[in-house]
Image (cartoon, rainbow, N blue to C red):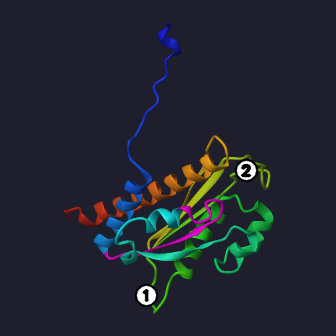
C-alpha cells in the first residue's frame, strides 16, 4: 500500500449539543442574549440552542425566514440588495443577523447577539449559486460580519446540518473572543 494514497482526515468527538451548550454558557456568564434568523436551516440553530438546559436565560427566539419576503419584512433585509445579489450573499446574512437582534428585542432590552443563516441546501442551485453555498452572519453590539462563502458537500440534510454546526461554532468563537478580550489585564 503506497503511503501517498493515505489522507489524514481530522475528526472531532464534539457534538452539536456541546457547541450549543458552550454558546449558552458563554452568554449566561455575561448576562447576554441571542436571537436567530434562519433560512436554509429552517429552525435548526434554534432547536440546537433550546436543547440546552437553561437556554431560556440567554436565547430570546428567532425568525425562520425561508421565503424571501420574510427576510425583507420582519428582518429588514434590503430589497434592493436581494434584487441585485439574490438571498445567498454575505450582506444578506449580516442583515439577517442584525434583523434577528431587532426582532427579538423586547421591553426596551436589546438582544445582544444575532446570528443569520442563508444558503442553498439543494436539490437545485439558487440565484446562480451552487448547492452547498452558505453564508453565516453574526451581529454584536460592536459590529456585524459575515462568514463564508462556505461550500458544504453532500445532500440537502448534510448541508443544513453542517450549516447549523458552523453557525453555532462561529457564534461560540465570537463570544469566546469577546470574553477573553474583556478579561485581559490592562497594561
Residue at numbered disc 2: 122
Number of residues whose C-alpha sits closer than 10 Å to that of mark 2, classed few (under 14), some (14–19) or many (20 or more):
some
Number of residues whose C-alpha sits closer than 10 Å to that of mark 1, classed few (under 14), some (14–19) or many (20 or more):
few
Please state the horizontal and vertical placement of residue 128, each as a whole percent of the image: 79, 51
Assign a secondary structure to mark 2. Answer: loop
Residue at numbered disc 1: 109
- Of discs 1 and 2, which sits in the foreground? 2
Please state if 156 lies on the left or on the right of 164 as rendered. Answer: right
Please state if 183 lies on the left or on the right of 7 as rendered. Answer: left
C-alpha gap between disc 1 and disc 2: 38 Å
Among numbered discs 1 and 2, the one appearing first in the sequence: 1
| Residue at x-position 46% and y-position 79% | 111
Please state if 70 lies on the left or on the right of 109 as rendered. Answer: right
Please state the horizontal and vertical placement of residue 151, each as a whole percent of the image: 63, 44
Please state the horizontal and vertical placement of residue 127, each as a whole percent of the image: 79, 56
Bounds of the magenta segment: 31-44
Q: Is residue 160 above or below residue 52?
A: above
Please state if 77 lies on the left or on the right of 169 as rendered. Answer: right
| Residue at x-position 75% and y-position 50% | 129
Please state the horizontal and vertical placement of residue 62, each as a whole percent of the image: 55, 74
Q: Is residue 36 magenta?
A: yes
Q: Is residue 103 magenta?
A: no
Amino acid at each position: 500500500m503506497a503511503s501517498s494514497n493515505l489522507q489524514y482526515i481530522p475528526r472531532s468527538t464534539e457534538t452539536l449539543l456541546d457547541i450549543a451548550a458552550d454558546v449558552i454558557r458563554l452568554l449566561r456568564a455575561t448576562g447576554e442574549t441571542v436571537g436567530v434568523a434562519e433560512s436554509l436551516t429552517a429552525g435548526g440553530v434554534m432547536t440546537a440552542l433550546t436543547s440546552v438546559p437553561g437556554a431560556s436565560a440567554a436565547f430570546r427566539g428567532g425568525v425562520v425566514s425561508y421565503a424571501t419576503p420574510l427576510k425583507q419584512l420582519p428582518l429588514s433585509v434590503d430589497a434592493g440588495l436581494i434584487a441585485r445579489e439574490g438571498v445567498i450573499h454575505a450582506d444578506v446574512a449580516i442583515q439577517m443577523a442584525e434583523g434577528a437582534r431587532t426582532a427579538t428585542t423586547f421591553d426596551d432590552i436589546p438582544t445582544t447577539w444575532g446570528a443569520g443563516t442563508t444558503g442553498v441546501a439543494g436539490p437545485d442551485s439558487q440565484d446562480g449559486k451552487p448547492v452547498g453555498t452558505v453564508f453565516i452572519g453574526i451581529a454584536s453590539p460592536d459590529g456585524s460580519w459575515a462568514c463564508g462563502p462556505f461550500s458544504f458537500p453532500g445532500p440537502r440534510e448534510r448541508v443544513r446540518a453542517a450549516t447549523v454546526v458552523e453557525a453555532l461554532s462561529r457564534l461560540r468563537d465570537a463570544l469566546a473572543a469577546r470574553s477573553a478580550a474583556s478579561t485581559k489585564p490592562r497594561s
